[in-house]
Image (tube, rainbow, N blue to C red):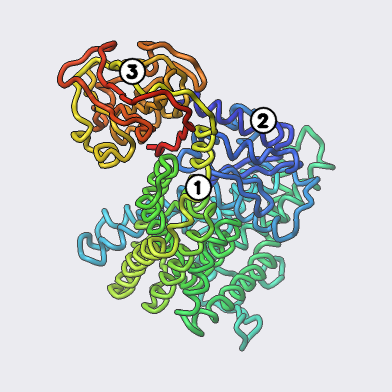
Amino acid sequence: MANNYNNLAKSIIKNVGGKDNVNSVVHCTTRLRFKLKDEKKANDDAIKDTDGVVTVVKAAGQYQVVIGNEVNDVYEAVIKEGGFPNGGQVPDDSDDDSSFMDKAISLISGIFTDILGPLSAGGIIKGLVVLAGVIGLLSIKSGTYQILYAIGDSIFYFLPIFLGVTCARRFKMNQFIGLAIGAVLTYPTMVQLASSKTVLGTLFANTPFASEIHTNFLGIPVVTMNYTSTVLPIIFAVWFASIIEHWANKWVPSVIKTFIVPVVTMMITLPVAFIVIGPVTTWLGDGIGAVMSSIYHFSPIIAGLLIGGLWQVLVIFGIHWGIVAVATTDLAALGYDPILGLTCMVCYAQVGVVLAIIKQTKDPNLKKNAIGAFFSGLFGVTEPAIYGVTLPRKIPFVLSCIGGAISGAIIGAFGSVLYMIPSMGIFAIPGYVNPKGNSTMQIAGVVLAAVVAFVVGFILQLVFGKKYVDRAYDEKQAKKVQEISKAAVATTNLSTSLISPLNGEAIALSEVKDEVFSSGAMGKGMAIKPTEGILCAPADGEIIMTFPTSHAIGMRTKDGAEVLMHIGMDTVNLQGKGFKTLVEKGQQVKAGDKLVKFDIPAIEKEGYTVTTPIVITNSSNYEEITPIVNGKVKVGEKIIVLQGNDKKKILVSGQQKLA
């Protein structure tokens, strides 16, 4: 498996323009996020066609390669293969000509990407612990509850410390200075000072931004605030610190840089952070939250329809991180967030659509990809479903957005809000548990939203989306049939015979457990239950059809009979596992030549039969087709006689159904 990741990494790096074209690369739950020097050097089609890649997305100033659940392993292989410094996480934006919005989105995305896993883990643990306390499974005064709650809550409480590290990476400065800035902002004495009863004055009194002054710094009034769990103050503080650090590095002598640069950086940054940056960014966050909340309070249902319906579009372009940042701010200021909570069950609309597609598709590759995407989606990871299944087919994606809008409206109608940053899918549900009161109706609304989204997505796809599922696949298959069916005039001897291509037991075609074959719809013939995994040529002729999955093969005998041999039923689903084609299309063969090798025990272990129909797909050209054996049969033994009165010119149809 490691070799597969290494090969995939080599292919990706080559087709993004080589490692010299990469400024940085990070990853999220399902995507590699490249910052390229020149996106024009990337070969989009080659990357999309690479096994292991779902698709390519260009958004938020990033070149995003969607991998799926194995993105972490692929990312490590990319870092190793490319030899990227600092884990590929330090960008160089010197020649970045992307828009301000793209840069802002890329910044927020990059800051949160590295801690997404711990944030999700904390959300799951904290939610389950709170739920256990609410239902009485754990006493909130017990040591067990307090320890488990600390495990879940710590990353949220000390979020500025974690963000201090990731921000420092993004701003290309000493990561430990970033960590130290976050630690000072959450220092217990400063947190306690924010709630001190000693008030020296009030700034912006009688306005929504009224703030008490509890202390001063060198005579300058300081608006002390609680910066635990906040986002914007640490981002801007570290950005300011990076400017100071770069400035200090220019004039501090090399022999004392190690300790003097951090001293200068912290001594300038932190007072400014407490006096200016912290209060201003907190007010900014409060303002953004107020706007979002006003939309919600105008109509939670309308807000749910809009945000739930657009959420997947925001995910595609990577701009959903803005809402995540606002939600974090709301949680710090209000103790709850109503906006992000409208989106958490959208994934089940996508999952419902994908399940319907699994039921509808005839394309084995799509079915395989959709099944994997379905299970990922159950846990809220919908990128494989979006990029690999619904978005390429357009209408199914639109239908999933409709289901998502309905889920958001239901959550809004029930007044369900988040009390912590959630995980995804079913693991988001504990995030709606109110640790201070009864949340039965809120939880019921969320569960109902998930169920309705799933059902709506499933039904909409069944009713309106079917014709969009296999359009490309059908065109591809039609082209394949056309190639097989090239008009060719052949002289056909209507009195001929076929020998057994297998060792085994001959049975009537009607006994095959597949209606297409047993009914004779594919043509007349017989079937053999093989005892040995070698399929041979039943006559002299030409191979006219092979399959990538090697489960079937077609040939035209020198006398013009078109013979299809199909090893097992539904074995196409094995995607070639246990099969090996030994000949090529267009190859001339002699009776008894080996055509396909297959592993009977391995195929049967997967739950498939190896009973092999042998049918004459141009049966209408013959007056009579008669199987002449029953029971044990060996390769080379005559098994079918094809009878006619004379030789005549016929048009080779080749229009057999592709099974």
Residue kind at label 3, given as amino acid type: Leu
Work out whether mark 1 precedes mark 2 in sequence or the reverse, and give the earlier one: 2
Q: What is the residue that sits farthest to the right in this orientation?
A: 251
Work out whether mark 1 precedes mark 3 in sequence or the reverse, and give the earlier one: 1
Front residue of this view, candidates 429 and 639: 639
In which quadrant will I find the N terminus? top left
Q: What whole-number distance in Å separates the C-alpha atoms at marks 1 and 2?
A: 22 Å
Q: Residue under circle 3?
A: 535
Quarter of the figure with residue 495: top left
Mark 3 or mark 2, whichever is nearer to me = 3
Q: Regarding mark 1 in the picture, which secondary structure is present there?
A: helix
Residue kind at label 1, given as amino acid type: Gly
Residue 497 at what x, y percent from top left?
31, 18
Q: Regarding mark 2 in the picture, which secondary structure is present there?
A: helix
Q: Residue at x 38, y 24 (%)?
A: 646
- In the visual, does 536 lie left or right of 205? left
Q: What is the residue that sits farthest to the left in this orientation?
A: 631
Q: Residue under circle 1?
A: 388
